[in-house]
Image (cartoon, rainbow, N blue to C red):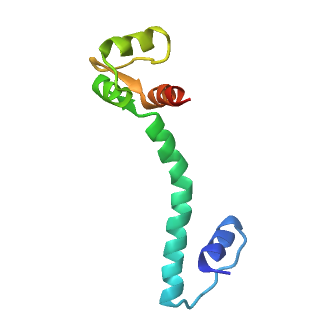
């Protein structure tokens, strides 16, 4: 059993006894690596979702879709893009732009 697994097991059991361990630097290094890997696995889906929900400017939409202002207006009119008001400007959801790009590739 490695240190990370041992720590996870003792944290999930409120009745686990206190123990004293002697660890090598290699074991401590492996604990850090395992902790980073586990954190990455938990955060990656959250970060991916945040990227999908990112708000784009009109210029970013034009660039990603390779279209102009009239086409963005048409996509908005057909319900493919939903404008989001941010202060005095309009933004569009990355997820909706990605959906349009994916439908072009099909």
Depth check: 62 or 42 in front? 62
Please report the residue visible at 60 percent of the width from the left and 74 percent of the height from the top: 4
Please report the residue visible at 51 percent of the width from the left and 59 percent of the height from the top: 40
x then y, percent, for residue 17: 69, 78
Please report the residue visible at 47 percent of the width from the left and 46 percent of the height from the top: 47
Q: Is residue 42 left or right of residue 92?
A: right
Q: Is residue 41 left or right of residue 9?
A: left
x then y, percent, for residue 67: 34, 21
76 in relation to 20, above or below: above
Location of the C terminus by quadrant is top right
Q: Quadrant of residue 11?
A: bottom right
Depth check: 78 or 18 in front? 78
Location of the N terminus by quadrant is bottom right
x then y, percent, for residue 56: 35, 29
x then y, percent, for residue 68: 31, 18
Q: Is residue 21 left or right of residue 32?
A: right
């Amino acid at each position: 059993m490695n240190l990370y697994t041992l720590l996870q097991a003792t944290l999930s059991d409120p009745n686990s006894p206190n123990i004293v361990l002697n660890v090598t630097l290699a074991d401590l290094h492996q604990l850090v690596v395992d902790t980073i890997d586990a954190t990455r696995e938990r955060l990656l889906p959250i970060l991916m979702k945040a990227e999908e929900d990112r708000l784009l400017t009109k210029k970013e939409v034009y660039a990603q879709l390779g279209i102009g202002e009239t086409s963005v207006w048409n996509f908005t009119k057909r319900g493919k893009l939903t404008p989001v008001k941010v202060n005095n400007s309009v933004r569009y959801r990355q997820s909706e732009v990605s959906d349009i790009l994916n439908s072009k590739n099909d």
